[in-house]
Image (cartoon, rainbow, N blue to C red):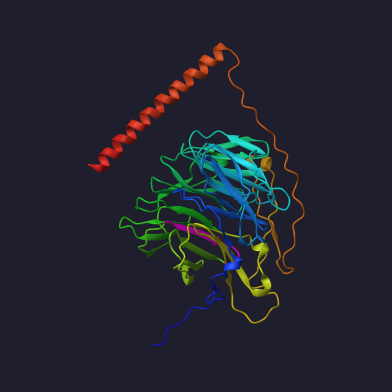
């Protein structure tokens, strides 16, 4: 019998190894073991976490500055290692970073890029009690960001006003990933306790949670339209992918074993083309799948293979793709000393605009203010057509940070009250350490 081949316009998507001169060379990428992508990008720049001898720093480099780099100016204001970075979705000249020093910093990128290192951020947000591991900006509400920390909390912030908007409790261990849905109304997290959780941060409570992967290594979760995708490890250390419906979170719609490699998986979803990209840390390949609405919900398309293992990966916004060459995605692959652009294309002979593979895409313009979002309003992301090619956005509204001054105790009474609070906090943390030590002893016996 002849095998029926599934019809798909993305069945022949391919990617090629970039030329050496197209790569960004002589970079000093961080050696941190923290599970981060180490890289982020917008339409004008990409940022990569730097290997710093003291404190924490990261570089922001224009896309056109490919080739060998000599002297790279840095953002170097953190006192400890930088763990994650993210660009502001509506202002191309703003980037956020989080660090082991418990702070979230918002930095301004000078027009044209950095010419000298910058040590003073535009805004510093304090409130987490332990190292801050992730930062993610709301895709709809202006100046709203979510962070997760070793204090087991997810906080949302108005980065312009310098205010903590909401705090979500309910996690029982280290949070390993934290991502918004497409309209910024919900967040999905994964945690060292093996659970994935979905919640609206404005309600300050967990809506759904499920044990997504039984393995002890880190897992991650992202939204894919109205579904949740998790990647992690099984009890037998096989890499897995699960697809969930958040409305029926107890059982996955689909579950697949990827392979038995040991590297952590990094998932990226292209909502315009319904393509899921999976890259493993330490792997040289990037697999990609097409997601559909009926069982089995996911179909393998192909994979990009390379002999160079990746440490991290990110994808550029669709607005800066080359539509004349049918480029549907462009990733930046991080190795210890380079960043390599990987372009994914649909093979077509015509050079006219292909509207079937380029629906209206995310415009990078806010639909809500921070005040509207925190009061409960929801809105869909604004979209733009790519038919006219890349069009530079109008300048974003000026970022006017309001610096929040941390006032200490003003008299002896307030000082004593603060002292008692800190004593209680220390006692709590010591009891938590005793519990952890007992748990470790139990597991090792």
Residue 154, position in %: x, y?
52, 40
Foreground of the two, 206 or 30: 30
Quadrant (top left, top right, bottom left, bottom right) of the C terminus: top left
Taking the spot 44% from the left edge, 25% from the top edge, the residue there is 425
Describe residue 280's horizontal placement relative to residue 95 as left or right.
left
Residue 215, position in %: x, y?
35, 53
Taking the spot 64% from the left edge, 54% from the top edge, the residue there is 61
- Mark yes or no: residue 184 visible: no
Question: How many numbered marks are there?
Answer: 0
In this view, which residue lies farthest toward the top?
A: 412
Residue 269 among magenta residues: yes
- Mark yes or no: residue 82 visible: yes
Residue 277, position in %: x, y?
51, 64
Foreground of the two, 195 or 61: 61
Which stretch is magenta? 264-273
In this view, which residue lies farthest toward the bottom?
A: 1
Residue 132, position in %: x, y?
51, 40
Quadrant (top left, top right, bottom left, bottom right) of the N terminus: bottom left
Predominant SS along the magenta part: strand
Residue 359 among magenta residues: no
In the picture shown, does residue 122 fall above or below 95? Answer: above
Foreground of the two, 214 or 123: 123
In the picture shown, does residue 348 fall above or below 125? Answer: below
In this view, which residue lies farthest toward the right?
A: 394
In this view, which residue lies farthest toward the front?
A: 70
């Amino acid at each position: 019998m002849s095998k029926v081949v599934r019809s798909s316009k993305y069945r022949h998507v391919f990617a090629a190894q970039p030329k050496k001169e197209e790569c960004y060379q002589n970079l000093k990428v961080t050696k941190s073991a923290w599970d981060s992508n180490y890289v982020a990008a917008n339409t004008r720049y990409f940022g990569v976490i730097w290997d710093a001898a003291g404190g924490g720093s990261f570089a922001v480099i224009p896309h056109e500055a490919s080739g060998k780099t000599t002297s790279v100016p840095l953002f170097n204001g953190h006192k400890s290692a930088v763990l994650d970075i993210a660009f502001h979705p509506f202002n191309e000249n703003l980037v956020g970073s989080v660090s082991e020093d418990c702070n979230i910093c918002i930095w301004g990128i000078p027009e044209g890029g950095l010419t000298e290192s910058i040590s003073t951020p535009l805004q510093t947000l304090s409130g987490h009690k332990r190292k801050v591991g992730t930062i993610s900006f709301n895709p709809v509400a202006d100046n709203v960001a979510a962070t997760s920390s070793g204090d087991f909390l997810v906080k949302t912030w108005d980065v312009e006003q310098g205010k903590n908007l909401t705090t979500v409790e309910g996690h029982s261990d280290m949070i390993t990933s934290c991502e918004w849905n497409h309209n910024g109304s919900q967040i999905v997290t994964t945690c060292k306790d093996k659970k994935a959780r979905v919640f609206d941060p404005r309600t300050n409570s967990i809506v759904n949670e499920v044990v997504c992967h039984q393995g002890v290594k880190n897992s991650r979760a992202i939204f894919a339209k109205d579904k949740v995708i998790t990647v992690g490890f099984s009890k037998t250390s096989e890499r897995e992918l699960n697809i969930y419906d958040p409305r029926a979170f107890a059982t996955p719609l689909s579950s697949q074993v990827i392979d038995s490699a040991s590297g952590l998986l990094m998932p990226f979803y292209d909502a315009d083309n319904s393509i899921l990209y999976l890259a493993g840390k330490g792997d040289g390949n990037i697999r990609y799948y097409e997601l559909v609405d009926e069982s089995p919900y996911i179909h393998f398309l192909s994979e990009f293979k390379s002999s160079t293992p990746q440490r991290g990966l990110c994808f550029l916004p669709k607005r800066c793709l080359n539509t004349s060459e049918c480029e549907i995605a462009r990733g930046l692959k991080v190795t210890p000393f380079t960043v390599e652009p990987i372009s994914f294309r649909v093979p077509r002979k015509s050079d006219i605009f292909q509207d079937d593979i380029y629906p209206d895409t995310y415009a990078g313009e806010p639909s809500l203010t921070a005040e509207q979002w925190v009061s409960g309003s929801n809105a869909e992301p604004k979209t733009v057509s790519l038919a006219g090619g890349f069009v530079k956005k109008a300048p974003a509204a000026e970022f006017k940070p309001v610096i929040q001054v941390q006032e200490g105790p003003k008299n002896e009474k307030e000082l004593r009250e603060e002292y008692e609070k800190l004593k209680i906090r220390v006692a709590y943390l010591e009891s938590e350490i005793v519990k952890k030590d007992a748990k470790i002893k139990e597991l090792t016996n």
